[in-house]
Amino acid sequence: MDHQEKQGFRSALGRFATGVTIVTTNDRDGQPIGVTANSFNSVSLDPPMVLWSLAKSSYSLESFSTGEHFAVHILSCDQQELSNRFARRGENKFEGLTHIKKPAPLLEDCTARFICRTAFQYEGGDHIIFVGEVTDYTAGDKPPLLYLEGRYAEARRPADKTVDQINPDKVRIGSQSLTHLLARAYVQISRQIHRDLVTCDMKQPRLMIMIAIEQHESPHWEDVRARVEANGYSATDEDLEGMISKGWIAKASDTLRLTTKGREHYYEALSRMSDFEATFCEGLTEGELAEIRYVLGHIIDNTDDGEPTLI
């Protein structure tokens, strides 16, 4: 499978919404190890068993392969920063966190937690699949954190209402509803942009990172991450490291800048987006385009929540 096929396969998998977990164990020296993973699933009720998988390239693989126990923490919707912390490499992820050390490091305030004895390990392509027998578990009532199409999301049940409490005129969203039209236009445009970016070895979060760097002189990584995530995308250390290894970004004194090569990819991506915009604007007059821009600007102003934006 070539790079483009891999990106397409990853994109297709991203349509499946998953929960977000942190899986922990202890290494040979008894030190806590933890990774963020969304490859979690149930296996059996009797006996109670669950599974998850870890890339063979992960530096934590040996600890999980030799460990007798692991714990799976299903994160709640307010634990996005904790998820980001355990998705990063090369730092003490447990620093400042309260946790119980045995039989595996146990974190607090998750929506559910499963303590497992490692039962089986299987080869699964470029991953190792771990099956654990659940020896104990806890469950809370916080809504879980979700991951969908490369971004975080929240899971919430619709409020229960009796039939006589529902006003059909207020809850009906037809094909001409403004909310429906805006959402559908966003989804269709984003889908096409994603496909175009993949063809030039780019993906949406990486482009957002480049925009944040290019528009703010010598920013720090945490500032870039905050701006990208405030716009609904996940910016990980792996994304940054990958762009540095490609020679797109240079890092000096904890600040970032685009290299000449990176700026070339950046403007190629913007050019593709501009071409796509010209395509879907065909047939619209300048007056119609001006009116659309005015209406969208008005909606943005009326829904501004004060979060930082990229542009």
Image (spheres, rainbow, N blue to C red):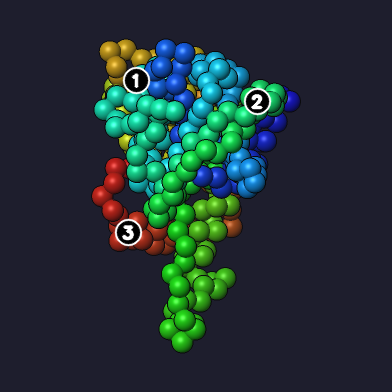
- Left or right: 80 as drawn, with respect to 129: left
Residue indicated by mark 1: 92
- Residue 232 seen in this snapshot: no
Vertically, is 140 above or below 291? Answer: above
Distance (Cα) linking label 2 and label 1 = 27 Å
> Where on the picture, by quarter, is residue 128?
top right
Mark earlier in primary sequence (2, 3): 2
Distance (Cα) linking label 2 and label 3 = 49 Å
* Number of other residues with Cα within 10 Å of mark 1, as a class: few under 14, some 14 to 19, many 20 or more: few
Q: Position of residue 296 (x, y in %)?
A: 40, 58
The type of residue carrying mark 2 is: Gln
Mark 3 in CB contact with mark 1 (< 8 angstroms): no
On the rendered image, what quadrant is the C terminus found in?
top left
Give the residue at x 58% y 28%: 118
The type of residue carrying mark 3 is: Thr
- Front: mark 3 or 1: 1
For mark 2, give the secondary structure. Answer: strand
Vertically, is 309 above or below 28? Answer: below
Q: Position of residue 37 (x, y in %)?
A: 51, 33
Vertically, is 142 above or below 237? Answer: below
The type of residue carrying mark 1 is: Asn
Give the residue at x 40% y 22%: 32
Residue projecting furthest to the right? 1
Give the residue at x 43% y 83%: 165
For mark 3, give the secondary structure. Answer: loop
Mark earlier in primary sequence (2, 1): 1
Distance (Cα) linking label 3 and label 1 = 38 Å
Instruction: Say which mark, if any, is on residue 303.
Output: 3
> Where on the picture, by quarter, is residue 96?
top left
* Number of other residues with Cα within 10 Å of mark 2, as a class: few under 14, some 14 to 19, many 20 or more: some
